[in-house]
Image (cartoon, helix red, strand yellow):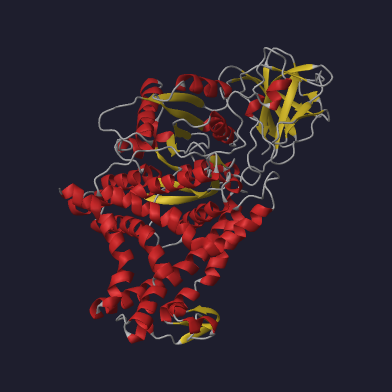
Amino acid sequence: MVERLLRAIPFLISAFIASSIFWAPWHSWTATLLAGSLTVFFVYWVIRSYSVTIAAWIAIRRLNQWVKVDWAARYRAEERDTPWDWPRHMVIIPNYKEPEQGLERTLAALAAQKHPEQLVIVLAMEDREADVHEKARRLTSKFAGAFGDLFATFHPAGIPGEAPGKGSNEAWAARQAYLRLIETAGDDLDRYSVTSCDADAIFHPNHFAATNYQFLTAEDRYRTFWQPAIFNTNNIWEVPAPLRIPEGLSGVNRASNLILPFSVKFPTSCYTLSWRMLHEVDYWDEEVIPEDWHIYMKCTFSLGNRVRVKPIWIPLGNDCVLSETSAKTFRAHYTQAKRHAWGASDIPYAWRAVANGGPASFFRRLTLASALTKVHTFWVAQWYLVTLGVLLPAKMTGSFGASMPEWWSHKAFNIPGIGLHPENIVNPEAWLTIGQAGVIEPTIWLNFCGLLLTLCLPPLVGIVAFEAKIRPARPAGISRIETFKQLGMWPLMAPITFFWASLPALDAQLHLARGRDLIYRVAEKGSRAFRPADEPSTLDRVAPEGHHPHSHLMTDIAEEILAMPSILTLSPVHEPAWNVVADDDRYVLKDTLLGGMTVSETVLHGGQSTRGHAHPWPEIYVCNTGRGTLFLDHDGGRPMTPGTRVIVPSNVHHRVATEDGVTFTSIFEGPRR
């Protein structure tokens, strides 16, 4: 009974606040209380609006700075004791019925990192998915040798006490990884970070270099969460225009929250923490669906005040929800928003921790519980306060005799605009009258709260500009009309955010209050441009029959996420496999074995090897245009265009036929530093 009451708290608070503007104006003492509360809220809203806008633009500046840093060079210049390549970064990718092409895209972005040999990738599969073992085999085969390690785990279905979802799958995967890497292989747990990775995440190529630096230099690495700036921009041009509003605003809120000094920061979606800390708290709780905020509170409540969130100012792209049709996309977005709002289920957990005590101080526990409650109740209620909190009580008082106090309802301010008096529409004489006696007048009269709300318009313009700044350029296949559609959606922000933000949150809280559990439904994402699984890529079709060239790993990663030069060489058929790494103006060819172990090294410069042997074959370069086109360049050493990236395992031999019939083997690549 007590637990049922605790689960109802989020809905009861949200419903009380949201409904207060409807019933409180009719009684003098509740009207006075409402007037004071609304005034305080709108003062807060003005401060918040300007703070969020300023913070968002500071975030852009930091993002632009961080992506340009050579983190390895900075670290070595500091002459620290711990080697740069000591850390290992385990990336867990929980997935269930995700498109294979989408997982390939995420793996390609990870393989495009500056130091992929430091990454350990765990494909956390759900065993209940049909043909999942074959799917995992294909993915691990395609990317074999691209990382320090890559393997799949298979989370069994039907374990008692578990809720199917990201958290339970990650917990299983992390424990399996512990058996493999720590207990069996004897590796050092302390050198590992763990990144919880969404299956649609596209990492900037500098992401894990920055993470590596932060992990090495952190004052308290075993009590820190690292949070990148996440933007739902991967496929934002493909979703219906109304949904771009909440998707864009989510990135604004996340980026600004990492800046604001007095905000309570929680890890969200994709985040990193030390394996040591994760192991100390016994991993994610398998019965919890909203795992990100929960694991942070679990670490804090278990380990004390030192647990903190630190920003990683590197952009990370996620997908927007996208289904086959617009109608299905709207429905899928509602479902996903409802699942995100299920984080309200953590409110009882947080307040129990406040009451029960623990290593964290009372103030710290109270701060987290209060912040969690505020976020989820305002998720529902702030729409009613901002949209109707001035208009409705004022109209009730002016036209229907409600009891809002004079100091609050008095309209002492006016601005040019179209003032509406819908209450006069019942009088036919008012239809042709312009002014306060008519339906419309050329002046908007405002009370103090109305003036405060009007002052929030400039920050809104700043947020619109910020959202346009971070959004990738309109793809070639998207009509220019979509740009105008997007601009036309901002005036409709109120109904859009009601149906796809406030309402699904209210639905989730009502579901929770009624004692129902949420069924975890995987959101449909990705791009409609993804080929069906059985359709070969353009490059697959140019390969000789019987050979698999792996060229479908050439993944078109958005230019604003991936904009760094890379070099790719094809050498004629020969016994070793050559892995090309750019080093200033030289090309280091590393003779590799299975797993990427270097056994010999030759340095080429200007077509001659340091051993004095002329290079017996022409260098041939491959450029992926993003449309599946293969270009061969015989210039013998020209670097690729910035933004080009091709990921091929360093231990796979295969053949590609050129236009002149010559067959080459062993495609490899390396970033130009």
Q: Residue at x 41, y 46 (%)?
A: 225
Quadrant position of residue 462: bottom right
In the image as oriented, which residue stretches furthest toward the left?
A: 1
Q: Residue at x 35, y 56 (%)?
A: 376
Counting every numbered tag in the picture gives: 0
- The reply to whether residue 463 is visible in this rendering is no
Horizontally, is 407 left or right of 478 in the view? left
Dividing the image into 4 quarters, which one contains the C terminus? Answer: top right
Picture residue at 48% right of the left edge, 81% below the top: 428
Q: Is residue 208 above or below residue 663?
A: below
User: Which residue reaches farthest front?
Assistant: 428
- Front-most of residues 476 and 630: 476
From the top left corner, tell me how far across and down residue 72 is, in percent.
58, 41
Residue 409, visible in the rendered structure: yes
Q: Position of residue 108 (x, y in %)?
A: 59, 32
> In the shown orientation, is residue 144 left or right of residue 569?
left
The vertical placement of 132 against 164, above or below, is above
Reply above or below: 588 against 565: above
- Give the answer, above or below, for where 441 lies relative to 515: below
Q: Position of residue 98 (x, y in %)?
A: 49, 32
Residue 298, horizontal then vertical, whole percent: 30, 45
> Is 628 left, or right, of 615 in this rendering?
left
Left or right: 414, with 347 as reference point: right
